[in-house]
Image (cartoon, rainbow, N blue to C red):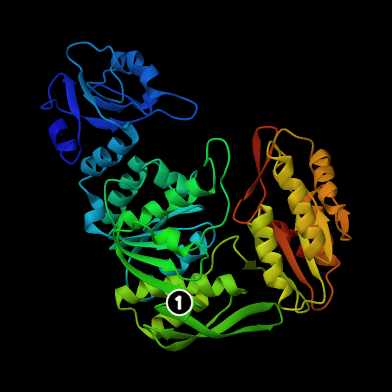
Amino acid sequence: MKLISLLERLEYTCIQGSTDQEVKNVVYDSRKVEEGSLFICIRGAVVDGHKFVPDVIAKGAKVLVVEEKVEAPADVTVILVEDSRYAMAFISAAYFGYPAEKLKTIGITGTKGKTTTTYMVKSILENAGYKVGLIGTIEAIIGDKVIPASNTTPESYMVQKYFHDMVEAGCDCVVMEVSSQGLMLHRTQGFVFDFGIFTNIEPDHIGPNEHKDFDDYLRCKSLLLKQCKTGIVNRDDEHFEKIIQGHTCELETYGFSPEADLRAEDAKLVGGKGYLGISYHLRGLLDFPVEIDIPGKFSIYNSLTAIAICRHFKVSEENILKALKVARVKGRIEMVKVSEDFTLMIDYAHNAMALESLLTTLREYHPHRLVCLFGCGGNRSRLRRYEMGEVAGKLADLTIITSDNPRDEEPQAIIDDIKTGMARTNGKYVEIIDRKEAIAYAIHHGEPGDIIVLAGKGHEDYQEIKGKKYPMDERVLIADILAGK
């Protein structure tokens, strides 16, 4: 492929060589360079790609895309750009033949609800006969292929590669989670989303290597409304006016607000043995009753978002309702049937904000007891442990403190930090280091009417100890416990 074709939608300066140069492949990892490669020098938080220029030239790179002038032999073309991450998005889109233009693209951002909403959208659209690709926190799904995720939003090269593979697999649309980091680092540049969804925003991801403050976090999230044709926004969010500031898209809203285009009215909690859900009446742009088998007010928001998107795909009321009934996300309020007497669920809540939201929601169902089992990750903020301990102590009737991913720390030291937070409350707790033993304790001591939450691991199927990941899926542990193993 000619270099000039890869640069056709980009502003650049050719400071050496020729744009007629033939390019064999596009690479941003110096270890993957081969003869005829175009190498993009990415300036990361830890590593600067510009430092690998001599190495990639020795391996045969024939084009360098750089943010600063570098030394290179005369037969190597050097392209200077303002931002190499931004350039990579457009070069990757061109390299894969602009696959986003062959798909309906749906991007979902927000502090909470991205993952669940993404799967709800996939479920509804597939029920209506669409073939849907997915990119998210847990995995990428391309046809029958499932690829575990390392980032919520992959690098732009991988986004474009996934889009290309989806087109090849016969997909007609893609729904993806869009993180603030992904927007900040231009991972979703190179195309315009057909639909951009903003679920909500709360303080999160603020600190070194993330966002300097809440305003920066909000600004980055709001970039999605400048990179989509139709924006769909939660009208109830207290930051709504700031979120939509400077938007360049057609705007639609959803929520409980009378001003929302699509709104929920008459919300009611529903539940039975081992089952928790919610119902409401949809008004505004659509009008029909909805019931979902996932508890809590945030489930209403997630389903409203999914319906607001799928309305544009002319999905019937029947298909929407049918799909919402079966939409499930691994590790997100995932009910696991263990008894007729009490309810047990697995959830990814792994920080104080998520845990507080979850436990507050479950309290509304007036359980006999609310039992919360959790641990905290090693090599992470001790403050998070204090906060989670305090939240569990305040909201749960019984907390079972156990191990999560201890990494390089001693599990007991992490538990002691959690207990520091618990000590600020009158909450009852037991501590059981071994997570399987802790889950067995929760199940064997379950009382009629209890709601038991296994928090923190969610979709993860491993436990990380001293740099090694050991298989550990809570669903497998539960099955073993019930089988008496």
- Quadrant for the C terminus, please: bottom right
Q: Can residue 90 be seen here?
A: yes
Seen in the picture, residue 292 relative to 30 is either above or below; the reply is below
Classify 397 as above or below 389: below
Query: Looking at the rendering, in which quadrant would you find the N terminus?
Result: top left
Give x and y (percent) for residue 293: 58, 77
**What residue is drawn where x is 39% and y is 17%?**
51
Q: Residue at x 69, y 40 (%)?
A: 381
State the residue position of label 1.
323
The residue carrying pointer 1 sits among few (fewer than 14), some (14 to 19) or many (20 or more) residues within 10 Å by Cα, namely many
Q: Looking at the picture, which amino acid does disc 1 mark?
A: Ala
Where is residue 43 drawn, in percent x and y? 40, 28
Could you say whether the residue bearing mark 1 is in a helix, strand or loop? helix
Name the side, left or right, on which 375 lies relative to 108. right
Instruction: Give the camera-side residue of 416 and 150.
Output: 416
* Count of residue discs: 1
| Residue 428 locus on image (x, y percent) | 89, 61
Q: Is residue 293 above or below residue 444?
A: below
Residue at (20, 38) in percent of width and height: 10
Q: Residue 343 in the image: state x and y as whole percent.
A: 73, 73
Picture quadrant of residue 466: top right
Query: Quick one: 459 or 456, which is closer to the camera?
Result: 456
Q: Nearer the viewer, residue 291 or 485?
A: 291
- Residue 2 seen from this side: no
Res 104 quadrant in image? bottom left
What residue lies at 37% left-to-right and 44% top-to-bottom? 187
